[in-house]
Each structure stands twice: as C-alpha cells, then as structure tokens.
Image (cartoon, coloured by chain):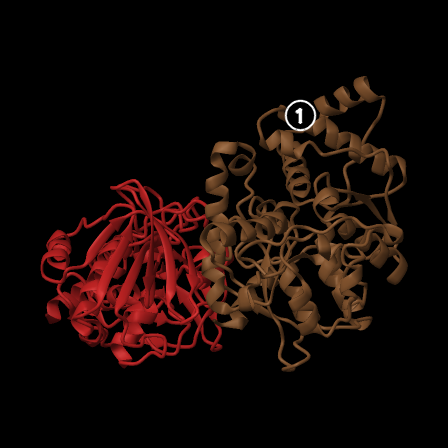
Amino acid sequence: MIYEGKQKVWSDYQKDIPDDHYFYVRSCIRQSFFPASEVTFLDITRNRLGKDIFETEHHTTCGGIAYHSDTIPQETVMTIIARQFALMAKNGYENYVCSCITSFGLYCETMETWREFPEEEARIKDILWKTCKLDFAKPKYLIHASDLVYKYRNLIAAQAKHKLINVKTGKPLKVVEHIGCHYSKMFPSKGVGGAEYPYVLVGMIEAWGGEIVDYPERRHCCGFGFRQYFIKGNRGYSLSNTYKKFESMEPFHPDLIITNCPGCPYFMDRWQYVIAESTGRTYGEEGHGIPVLTYEEVAGLVMGYDPWDLGLQTHQIDSEPLLDKMGIEYDPAQKYAGKNGKDIGSPICPTCLK
Amino acid sequence: MKNNVLIIGGGPAGIEASAQLQRLGYNVILIEKGSSLGGHLSKWDRLFPDGVHADGVLSSMLKNMSGVKSFTDTQVKSINRLDKSYNVILSNGISVLADAVLLASGFTLFRAEKKEEYGYGIYDHVITNADLEAYFSIGSDSRIDKPKKIGFVHCVGSRDEKAGCRACSKVCCATAVKQACEMKEEFPDAEVYCFYMDLRMFGRHYEDLYLKAQKEYGVRFIRGRVAEVSENADGSLQVKAEDTFSSKPLKVTLDLLVLMAGMRPSDAGRRVGDLLGMSVEEDGFFAVRDSVTSNQRSPLPGVFLAGTATGPKTLPETIADARGASMEIDRYLTDVFPQASDYKKLIREKW
C-alpha cells in the first residue's frame, strides 16, 4: 500500500466546512439504534468546543427510508426537505448539518436535482407555500455531522483523555472505517476524500492515534441496503453482505470498526451475533466480536465520556475489550443501569458470542 | 533561399516528417521538449504484431534525419502569423521564420490514477502498460515479483465517458495481447487474464496475434469490465469484474494488474495550439480541415498536423500520416512560394 497515493486522492476531494453556526437535524433511526450518539455530538460541539449548533423540535424525518423503499414519490421527499430548509432559514442559519447519511445523500440528490432542473425547485417552492405557508432558502453549506467532527478532529485530540492506542502494548489500535454508501458513493465530490478512499473517518482515526485497516471488501455495503433488509425475504442477502465484509477484514485483526451511517453500525453489530449463533464464527479476540461504534461514540471515548453514558451497552458486541485496550475505566455494575440508576434489564447471553 | 519548415515534436511523426521534408529539399527545424528524440517509442520495448524491437525501429528512423536541425529541451515560447509565414521564438533563444509549421505533438498517456477504483499509485502491484514496457526494457521492477496470476485491464481511460474519454485509443487491445504473450514467455507458469469490452484487433496480423495468445500462450480472455481492485493482507490484489458471457460477477486474486492506459491529447501540444489559437474537437485532439480528404491540414494556413496530435494511431499509421503531412506541406509550399520549385528541381537533378 502506497500511503502517498491515497494522500493524493484525499487532496483531490476536500470540501469547505464552515467552522461554526449550524442548523442541526437528527436522524430517525439513529435515535433508536444509538440513542446517545446525537446527544454526544451536541454536547461535544456545544459544550466542549463552544460551537453554535442549533436544533428545533419542529424538524421532521427527511423521508429517506420511505423514498428508498419506493413508498413515497420524489416530489414528497423534496417538499419535506424544502420544509427543513425553510426552518433553517427561519431561524437565521445558512449552514445545514445532518446526522443521517441517508438524509445527507437525499439532500445532495435534491440539491443536484434543483440545480439541473430549476423548474422543479420552483414547483416545490410553490407546493411548500401552498401546503405550509413557508418559503425556503437552500443552505449555503450542506454538511454531514461526521464532516464536522472531522473538521474538529484536532480540537478533540487536544482534549483527549484517551487515544486509540493499546495501553498495554503502546501500539495504535487497528481500526476499520466504514462510510455509509450515501455519504459519497452517489456524489464523490460531496464527501471528504471522495468515494473510493474516503478520508472523513480516516482523518479522525489518524488524529486520535489509531491505525487504519484497508481490507479488500472495504467498499462493500454493510448489508443494510434498505430493500435487502426491509423485505423479509431479502434478509439473507443482507446477512451475506455483512458476512462477506467480516470474512474479508478478519485476517487484519481489527480492534474496532468506526462508521458514520445509521444502518451500518447497527447491521455490522447485530449480524455478528447472527453469524456467531448460526455458524459459530466470531471475528474478535477469544470469541468476542469486533466492536462497531459511531464516530460520536469514538469521539466520546477519546474525550473521556463514561462508556455507559455513550450508550455502548446498547450494542450487541461487548465494548469492554476495546475499553480495556484504551485504558478506559468503567463500572461493570452500571452497564445496564438506566437514567438515575434505573435497572433497564440485561440481555440474555448468546451461545457462541462472548 | 530554401523555405523553413518548423516541426514541433520529436516523436515518430516528427522524425518521419522531418526526414521526408529534408529529402524534398526544405530547410527543416525540429524541436522537442524532452531531452532526446523518439517520444513514447523510445520508452517502448517491442512492437505489435511481430514483436520487433522498438529501439531498432527508432534507430533506423533517426538515421534518415541527416541534415535536419533538431533541438531538444526546446519549446515554443511565442508564435505569430506574418503575411505568409510564422515568426517563432524558441525557448533556447533562437527565432525561426517558418513558412510552414507541422504540429507533431503526439499524445500523453491517460493518468491511470484517475481511475481511482483500480488503485494505480496506491496498491503496490498495479502498474500500467508503459511501466511494463519499461520493465521489459530494463529487466527489473520492484512491483513485478514472479507473479503467478496476472491481469490486463483494457480500455483504461478510453471508451470511458465517466473518465471523460469517449474515444477508442486503438492501440491498447493489440498492446495488451502482445504484453500478455510476453508475460507468458517471461513467466510460463503464470495464469494471464485479459479483461476487455470487445477486442479491436483491426490491423494486419493482429487477429493472428489474438489467436496465438489463446492457442499457444493460453491467455484467458474475459469479456467484462473490472469494477474495483483491492489489496489483500499478503499484498496480492482482489479484482472484481463481470463476465458478460456467463452474466456473472467474478472475483479473482492476482499478483499483478496491468492497466492499459489510453491516449490523451498532449499537454505540450495543447499549449502550442493555444498560442496559435487552434481549435480542438470534443475528444480534445486537434481539429483538422476535413476528416476525410485533409486530415493533415489544420484550419490555419501553413499549419499542419501529423500523428497522434489528431487522435490515437498505431505506429504504422503515425508514420504514414507523417508522410501524408509531408506531401501536404510540399504542395502548400510549392503553391504559396513558387521559388521552391527551383531549388527542388536542382536537388532532383543532383539525384
């Protein structure tokens, strides 16, 4: 592997990311899958780094899941998005940052559609006015939340309590990065580092002390793929995608997988359990799985947040081996203690997966 | 006084045209931006379809250049149209009053790293056709280490709208088949695959070469494009492609992947073209006056074109094109400068 070659590609795909003042929109499914990630993002950016990140309870879904499941037409999606943009403008912001990769892809697609077909933009403007009495302005900058954490990666590193380094060996942790397909595969120029060798997560890993693992099926879909999972009969296909990725990365012995998409961490986390239970195959050390974390969770660990406050207990794969490697202290007794110490129950242990 | 002809570009087209025009009696000045003459030919080892050595071909071409004033490491600094001629100032400080200008600026190989998914410049064992020719010439390349499985990817930067190169580069198919055979000669136990869209073996004996590659060398031809390349833990390459005959995706592990980089317009040629205000066609190569009957004449008076300045060509086509351009220049100079007939007659009498 020629690192300088990758650097050349990365230098070709940089994007302008304003330093401050963002209108933030959450993801529908991330709040269920990884409930602390978005809260952590807001806490880090607002309270640790002092940035102005505004959100409103009036924003809605982007409609992406329905759109990609062919249950709503593009006009509906564009009108929903226009409404989000109207809320941004109404609150005095020009920079739009979204938590979800599906949303990011859909915003990019909508903006490109309007650029190519201005009459469509005019039509949606009209529909939005008729339905909501709102007018919208397109964002000056459209950013994914991982772009922003990438932008702040060195600020986060400067406040680091822990690094992506094995405290026992002193060696960098081996980290697999996985971007959501809709981050830059549709519009390579919209993602940091492009589509083939994306840099957005690599930049974080490098800044926080880890070592990137480039494995053959790095580009492959995580297995979510909307119809692969939503349609029950296709779920074997979803699982086989994930299986293919883990078989490919296993020879590199990664310590951690970091992702920037709602579906990817979920499926790469949960399907490890299914693979283990159905085949007995595990991919981590000594029968464990490989922890799959969101970039906010990793940033939180680096900055010294309590792992259970980050919601790592909601993952299928135990994060304790990773925490031990990073030298992070944690209270096992608090793992399944909810807010105010409430017992949220603990999962039944799998048969094969530790 | 003899008429001056300035030839810009010291590759095969420029060399051949300079030799022809010198023999016709003109005062020929050839400039080359590089430090030696020969262009891409000087970097090639053997030529299809017969495997003749490129250095032998180049040597024999250079021998015919007697009397031509050639300047290497030299470029056009400025060029201005006068009444019938062009006033050209060269980067070496020399001024030339050229009665005719021949642009034989050649081509640039497509930058294979632009096809990011193939990993040239990123994966250790991905090389280009030019790299492989250099290996054949020099005999060593750290990226080529007794490969047991070798792949050739046709049409890298040609017939590819996504890469901005719609045109066929013409020579890549035959080059790939030639190089595949050569690799089998070098590594007889290696399995060699060619990933192609369709094979354009249009020239004389090219089809024979293709059949020989299959029957004698056992090269396997797979009709389908390579989708992406990755690197395994041991440094070998994982190549994903489609076999369109069986309508199935395939994944193969290779030790070496050779990208057949296509021909793109020369950057240096474009620079001179801009100085002259010459137009280019959609493919980026120079426009000609008439694509059927005046392929070597530019729309500008007294400015001619030869070789791959007007699009991809094989070496025999380039040489033939240079000879055609020489005839066009001769006709032009004889028409525009009637005194040219006088000194040309004297030269003929000497023969």
Give left or right: position of A350 versus B104: right
Give me the residue at 62% from left, 57% from top: A317
In the figure, B269 relative to A185: above or below?
below
Give me the residue at 50% from left, 38% from top: A235
Q: Nearer the viewer, residue A348 or B71?
A: A348
Give left or right: position of B166 versus A106: left
Give me the residue at 30% from left, 56% from top: B333
Task: Say whether residue B81 is visible.
Answer: no
Percent from the top left, x then y, of residue A154?
Answer: 76, 68
Give me the residue at 68% from left, 37% from top: A111
Give left or right: position of B217 versus B143: left
Q: Chain of mark 1?
A: A
Q: Residues within 10 Å of mark 1 (few under 14, many from 20)?
A: some
In the figure, A52 relative to A66: above or below?
below
In the rendered image, the residue lying farthest to the top is A130
Task: Say whether residue B202 is visible.
Answer: yes
Q: Nearer the viewer, residue A218 or B198?
A: A218
Q: Nearer the viewer, residue B210 or A236?
A: A236
Give left or right: position of A329 versus A65: right
Please name the amino acid that badge 1 sits on.
Glu
Percent from the top left, x then y, of residue B320?
Answer: 21, 57
Q: Which residue is mark 1?
A: A120
The chain drawn in brown is A
In the figure, A93 relative to A231: above or below?
below
Quadrant including the C terminus of chain A: bottom right
Q: Nearer the viewer, residue B261 or B188?
A: B188
Residue A284 placement: quadrant:
bottom right
The chain drawn in red is B
Percent from the top left, x then y, of residue B250?
Answer: 33, 50
Residue B179 placement: quadrant:
bottom left
Percent from the top left, x then y, of residue A187?
Answer: 59, 45
